Image (cartoon, grey):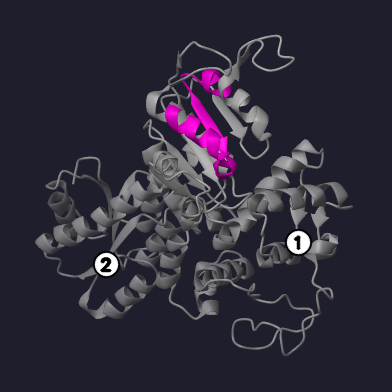
Amino acid sequence: MNSRVHVVIVEDEEGNRDSYARALSKLGWEVTAFAAAEPAIEYLREHRDVVLVITDLLLPGADGLGVLDAAREMDPDLGVLMITGHGSVESAVDAMKRGADDFLTKPVDLFVLRTRASAVVEKRLLRRRVTELESRLAEKFGRIVGRSKAMEALFRQMEMVAPTRSNVLVVGESGTGKELVANALHENSPRRDGPFLPINCAAIPAEILESELFGHERGAFTGTSSRKVGRFELAHGGTLFLDEIGDLPVDMQVKLLRVLEQREFMRVGGTETIKVDIRLIAATNQDLETAVERGRFRSDLYYRLKVVTLRIPPLRERREDIPLLAEHFLATLGRENGRPGMRFSTEAMRALLAHRWEGNVRELRNLVESLIVLCAGDEIRLQDRPDPYRGAAGDPEPTAATEPLPAGGQPAGRDAEPFLEIPQGATMEEIERQAILNALKRTGGNRTQAAEMLAIGLRTLQRKLKEYRLAGKVAEG
C-alpha cells in the first residue's frame, strides 16, 4: 500500500478514533477522522480520492448505515468497513447486505483492523484500476460504441495490437464495423499522422484492381495517358486497409504476398521498384480457413495476414449494446437531419431488443435514420416501425396467459406496463440485466426497493450493478 491511499474514519469515541488513525497511519496511509456522520459525508462529497471509509455503526445524529448508504451512492467502488459493539452483530450483518465490505466488533484488535482494512483497500484499488482502464479504452476507441463484455474484450485486444506494426486480420459479419476497428487501430498507432487508406476488394472489378493497388505507368493500358499512383504508394508511412480480402482474385493474392514479404512492388507497366513502409490491416466476412481448404485462398497469404486476428461479435451476441447504439444513432443522426431531441418509447426499444439484426450495426443505424426521417412526432413508437420490422401478423396484444408477471407474482393489469419482456434468444445475463434496469426504473433509482422487488439482497444488487456496469447509468438516470 502507498501513501496515496486516503482513508476516512468516523468514530465518536475520541480514544478509539485516535488509536484507529495511528494504526492506519503506520501503513503510510493518509487518514482523516470525524466524530459524526454529517461532516464525514460532506467531506466524502468533496474528496473523491478516498478509498476506504471506516465507520462506527452507532453515532450521534445519522448512524453508520447513513454513512454507508451515502458512500455507496457517491462511489460504488468506495470501500466501507463497519465497526460495531458485541450487541449489534445483527445490525452489522444487515450492513453487509446493504453493501459494506466487512465489519469488526469492539474492542477492535488493531492488527486485525490493519489486516481487514488492507484487504478491502487492495480489492477496491484493483476495481478502480479496472474502471480506469475501461474508461481509457472507451476514450481511445470512442467511435466504436459498445460496453458489453464482448466489446470490452475486443477493446483490450485492440489496445495491445494498435502500437505494433503487425499485420491484422479483422473478421466479422457484414455491418459489424470492421473499417471502424481498422481506423481505430491506425489512430492509436505510431502511424496516426500518416494516411489511412481503405479499399474494398469486392467493389472493384478484377481487371482494374491491380492498378488501384499498385498504380500504373503511362501507356500501360489502352487509353492511359498519364501515370497513376496506387494505394500502396499513397499509404506509405501509414495504414492500408483491404476490406473483403476474401474476394481478392488468386492472381492478385500472389502479388500481394510478394509485397508483404519484400515491402516493394512495381507499377503496372513499370520497371522501377518502389519500396513502401505500410501497415496492412485486412478484413473479411468469409471463413478464410475454409477458403484455403477449397483452394480459393492461398494458405501462405492467409498466414501472413493473420499475424493477429480480431473478431468483432455480431449484434445478436451483444444485445446489451442495442439500447446504447440506438440512442447514439438517434442523437447523432437526429442532429444531422435537423430533428434533435427525439426519443424511443419503451415499446419501441423493446422491439429493437427483440429483433435479430442480421445486418448488424449497419442495419440498426439505417433503421434509426429511417425512423428519424419518417416519424411524425418526437417520440418513436411501436407503430412507427417499417413493415419488415413487424411480425408476420402484426404484434398481438398481450393476454393474461402471456403477460409477464411483475414483482410479487401478480399479473399486471391491462393498463399496467409489463415488468419484463424476454426477447427470443436472450441469454440469462441479458434477462437479468434488463430485470435490474426495470426494477430501478420502477423505484425511481431506489436500490433498496429495487432489491426487494427483485427478491434479492441489497449487497447482491450492488454486486450485479458493478458486474453489468450499470452503476454509472443508474446514477445518471
User: Can the viewer see residue 46 in this picture?
Assistant: no
Q: Which residues are magenta?
A: 230-258
In the image: residue 66, left or right of residue 144: left
On the image, numbered disc 1 is attached to which residue? 345
> Which residue is located at x 70 percent, y 48 percent?
365
Disc 1, SS: loop
Quarter of the image for residue 460 reads bottom left
Q: Quadrant of residue 106?
A: bottom left
Dividing the image into 4 quarters, which one contains the C terminus? bottom right
Q: Is residue 34 magenta?
A: no
Give the farthest residue toward the front: 222
Q: Looking at the picture, tell me which residue is in the foreground, 475 or 82.
A: 475
User: Of the residues tagged 2 and 1, which is closer to the observer?
Assistant: 1
Circle 1: residue type? Ser
91 up-or-down from 67: above or below: below
| Residue at the (51%, 68%) spot, across then down | 447
Task: Decide if residue 18 is on the left or right side of residue 306.
Answer: left
Q: Nearer the viewer, residue 413 or 106?
A: 413
Q: Nearer the viewer, residue 349 or 47?
A: 349
Point out the tag, 2 or 1, that comes first from the N-terminus: 2
CB within 8 Å, label 2 to label 1: no
**Does 55 appear above or below 177?**
below
- Per the image, label 2 sits on a secondary structure element best described as strand
Q: Residues within 10 Å of mark 2 (few under 14, many from 20)?
A: some
Q: Quadrant of residue 88?
A: bottom left
The answer to whether residue 339 of the structure is visible from this angle is yes
Q: Position of residue 243 (x, y in %)?
A: 58, 39
Which residue shows up at 60% across the image and 72% down it? 425
Q: Position of residue 297 (x, y in %)?
A: 50, 46
Q: Which residue is mark 2?
A: 102
Which amino acid type is marked by label 2? Asp
- At which x and y percent is residue 85? 23, 73
